[in-house]
Every structure is written in structure tokens, then in C-alpha cells.
Image (spheres, rainbow, N blue to C red):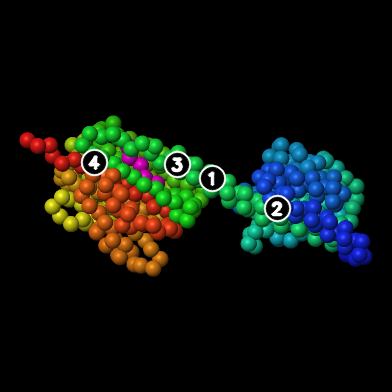
Amino acid sequence: MSTGDTTPDASEERLRRIEAVTAADLAHLDVEDLLGVLLQRVRTLLAVDTAAVLLLDSSGSHLVATAAQGIEEEVQQGVRIPLGKGFAGRIAAEKQPVVLDDVNPTNVHNPLLLRRGIRSMLGVPLLSGGNVLGVLHVGTLTPRQFTDDDRSLLQLVGDRVALATRARISHAERTAASALQRSLLPAELPTVPGLEFAARYVPGDGEVGGDWYDVFLLPSGRLCIVMGDVAGRGLPAAVTMGRLRTVVRTCALDLEDPAELLSKVDEHVRHFEPTTMTTVLCAMIDPEHRTLKISTAGHPPPVLARPDADAELLDLYHDLPLGVATARPRHTAEVALAPGTSICFYTDGLVERRNASLDAGFDRLRHAMVPERAEAACAAIMLQMVGREQVHDDIAILTVSRDHAPPT
């Protein structure tokens, strides 16, 4: 294969071509528009008939046609190429450029390439931090021997596409995860005579994850409180959290014992979400608000404050998180809710700090908890536990207070 012309005029031309695909005017474009512009410029600069970008799907097992010029049907027909199969699949699996001087059924997986009459192809991997994001490939309708210079230019474009795509996808995922999180957290906490509620949610380092809380009344009159934390960050964790929230609500309609409810949700997780691990705490308050039944699947215990005693962490049986294969039974504890009692449910971001032990975090929380009305208790906890600190992990917190007994 030729190494390309190295004369001064050729070098200047190559520099011009590189500048055309790295121009600053592309910085403001979103992913869809950026890919369209880059593919158009690549077709012109390399004098090719087709250009396409395929991105790896969320499973990491298939490449999906995302943008195309000259072979738009790849996108329109939703082409999916298994990793390691055919031309694009081989590029992604090997993380190396591939040249096909003669396209034929033995070296391509996608029949559209043959129907389109493509004779020669060049493709490069889209890499970010050593990880494959997808593949960029070009093709000609006449036989062509691509040079090293062609390959270098296409890889340069591929690197630009990978960088921009990773940044735009990350931004889009953060936006989607944030929107999903907001839509799934209760817009309004329920109005229940005799009880008050307050809540906060703070994303760690500005990126949402799988933390959630939920409060809802059941047909029996019981109040169900859920606090959970799906392992992971970003959109995948938020999506999983949304599915689990729905499962918990559905199971709560038929099961009034928190341990039984968590066992049922665990069955769902292990069957339908086998790669997921999550901690969940479930509590139910009886219609008279006298007792609270509670079970925890690996989740930190609530802190409770009574008017006549120091705040305390509830001493609960610490069952395993959901998604951990085990046949161990789950446990439910019962706690009395005297008039004037306040209780705080939370995720571990409230008490965990990189430079302090977890026990120290629990101690700080106990001292921050006060037997006040829900909003006052919630505000006091956030002031003492967070203050002006930039949190690095999500924090979800829900406080519940029971009114003092009415005067006789």
C-alpha cells in the first residue's frame, strides 16, 4: 500500500484536509449534526461515495448504524452488527483500522453494502480512553486502494468523532438521567393527617445516580416508605431505579409485611436484573400511626428522635442487599411511634465521607437529628451533615414526624 506523496504541496494539502475535519466551527454542534457534517466532509476529502458511523449499543454486543451519507438506508433500516462479525464488527473487536480492497460476502456482514454496490472500504475504530465507542467507515463504488494517508486522515476524523460523541452522549445521558430522576421522585409528598414529611435530593458531583425515595398510601390505610440506592451512576442506574420503584409499588399492593415485600422484589431483581445490586429499606406505618414496621436490605438504618430521649439509630437486622443470590430469610422489626417522634430515612451519601469512618458519620447524624417537625428536622440534618460541602455521592433524605398528642 502506498504511503502517500510527501512533497511540500502534498503536505500543505494534507494539513488543509486535517483542518477541515477539526475546525472550531464544529464545536457547537450536537451529535447528530456533528456526525452529518463530518461525514459530508470526509466524503469530499477522501473522494468516497459512502460514509457511516455505527455506535456500540448499551449492551456492548452490537454496533448500531447511527449516521450515514450515501448509504442512508443503514440508519433508516436500523442496521445492527454483532461485535466481531463482518467488517465493522471486526474493526470494533480488534480496535484497529481495516481495509477491504474487494468487498464480497465473505468479509462483510451487512448485505446492504453489497446491494449498494460498494467495491472497496476503509474503516477505523472510535476509541475513548481505550474503550470502543463504535466504528467509522467509508466506501467507494469503484475499486480503490486506500493509502496510509487516507487511513491516517480517517483515523483523525474518527478520533474527533469519538471525542465529541463521548462528550455529547455523556451530556445527553446526564440530562436524561436528571429528568428521569425528577420525574420518579415524588412531586409532592402525601398529605396524611397526624404526619408530616420533608425530603431532599442532592446529586453527587452534579451527576445523578440510583438513589430514590418514595412515600405512598396503600388501600389498607397503611403508609409505605421506601428508600433505595441502586449501585452505579448516571442514566443506567436511574433507569434501573425507575423500574424497581414500579416493582416495589406493585408488590406493596398485595404485601403488608416489609420483609415479604423486599423478598418479592428481590426475586424480580435476580430474575430480570441479574447484574443489578441495590440496597432498599421499606417501612410501613399503621393507620393509627402508632407503630412502624421496617425491613432493610443492606440499607443504612434510620435515625429516630423522641421528645424525651437522645436520637438513636434503629437496631435492625441487616439483611443482604437485593440481587445477591441467597436463600436467607428477611426480617421485619416493629418500632413504636410515640407522639412527637421524628424519624429520618436516608441514603449512604449522607453519612459516608472519604476521610472519616462510617461510625463517625452515624454519630454526626445522631447529634444532628432533633425531635422537631419534619421540615425543621430535615433542614437541621442537611445543615449539620452537608453545610457548604460539595458532596461526592448522591444524598436522598426523607424525614417523617408524628404530631404531638392533642390536648385533652
Q: Which mark is residue 144?
A: none
Q: Which mark is residue 285?
A: 4
Residue at position x 79%, y 56% in the image: 19
Whether the residues at callouts 1 and 3 have beta carbons within 8 Å, the answer is no
What amino acid does circle 3 point to? Arg
Whether the residues at callouts 4 and 1 have beta carbons within 8 Å, the answer is no
Residue at position x 18%, y 57% in the image: 310
Is label 1 in a helix, a strand or a loop? helix
Residue 13: tell me if it is visible. yes
Nearer-N-terminus badge (1/3)? 1
Q: Residues within 10 Å of mark 3 (few under 14, many from 20)?
A: some
Residue under circle 3? Answer: 182
Of tags 4 and 1, the one toward the viewer is: 1
Of tags 2 and 4, the one toward the viewer is: 2
Give the farthest residue toward the top. Answer: 219
**Magenta: main secondary structure:** strand
If the image is split into quadrants, where does the N terminus sit?
Answer: bottom right
Q: CA distance from mark 2 to mark 4?
A: 54 Å
Q: CA distance from mark 3 to mark 4?
A: 25 Å
Foreground residue, 68 or 31? 31
Q: Taking 84 as reference, is 340 left or right? A: left
Residue under circle 1? Answer: 175
Magenta includes 313?
Answer: no
Q: Which residues are magenta?
A: 212-216
Q: Residues within 10 Å of mark 2 (few under 14, many from 20)?
A: many
Give the farthest residue toward the left. Answer: 408
Q: CA distance from mark 3 to mark 2?
A: 31 Å
